[in-house]
Image (spheres, helix red, strand yellow):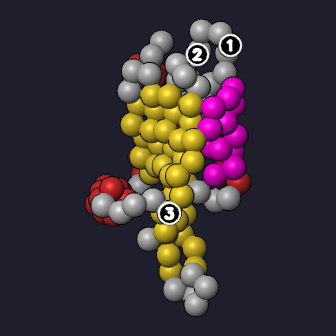
Amino acid sequence: MNVTAAVALGYIGYKMQNNNRAPRITSDDLDHMHGFPEDKRQEILGKIMSRIPETNAAFTGNNHYEKMILNLRRDDYRLIDLQPQEFLLTSVWYRKTRSVIGLPRLEVVMLLWVVEEDLTSLKTWRL
C-alpha cells in the first residue's frame, strides 16, 4: 500500500519492504489536523514558505522519522498538515510558546521523510 492510499483510508501506515515499521502518526494527530482551522493553517504555511528556516538538518538511518515524531509529541507539538506522496511524506507540526520577554510565539517544524532512501529532513521556524 502506498502512502497516499493509507491516508485515504484514514491511517498512515506505510509498510516498508524490508521491515514492518510504520510512521507513528496516530488517529489523535489526524483528528487534530482535521479540526485545525483552515485559514490559520494556510497563514502558518504561507509564513514558513516565505522565510528561511532557522534550522535545517538531515538524518539517514532506520528510525529517525519515528523518533522525531515521538519527540515532537513529547514537546507538545501538534500536527497541522500532512502531505503524502508516492515515496515521501511531509508533515508540519506546531506549538504555541512564549518568547523570552513573554510575547506569544509559534514554533513550527516540518518533517520530510523519503521512504526509499530512509532519509529524514527537519526544518524549524519561529514565528
Question: Which class describes the residues within 10 Å of circle 3: few (<14), some (14-19), or many (20+)?
Answer: few
Numbered-mark total: 3
What secondary structure is found at the residue carrying circle 3? loop
Q: CA distance from mark 2 to mark 3?
A: 32 Å
Q: Amino acid at mark 1?
A: Asn
Q: Residue at x 50, y 28 (%)?
A: 114
The residue tagged 1 is: 19
Is residue 116 rendered magenta in the image? Answer: no
Please tell me the numbered disc located at residue 59: none
Q: Residue at x 41, y 55 (%)?
A: 36
32 sits to left or right of 41: right
Q: Amino acid at mark 2?
A: Lys
Q: Where in the figure is residue 81, as x and y percent of width and height?
A: 42, 46
Q: Quadrant of the C terminus?
A: bottom left
Which is more foreground, mark 2 or mark 3?
A: 3
| Residue 29 can be seen in this image | no
Q: Where in the figure is residue 80, as x and y percent of width and height?
A: 45, 51
Q: Amino acid at mark 3?
A: Glu
* Highlighted range, magenta: 59-72
The residue tagged 3 is: 54
- Give the overall secondary structure of the magenta segment: helix
Mark nearer the N terminus (3 vs 1): 1
What secondary structure is found at the residue carrying circle 1? loop
- The part of the image, by quadrant, that contains residue 16 is top right
| Residue 118 can be seen in this image | yes
Q: Residue at x 69, y 26 (%)?
A: 62
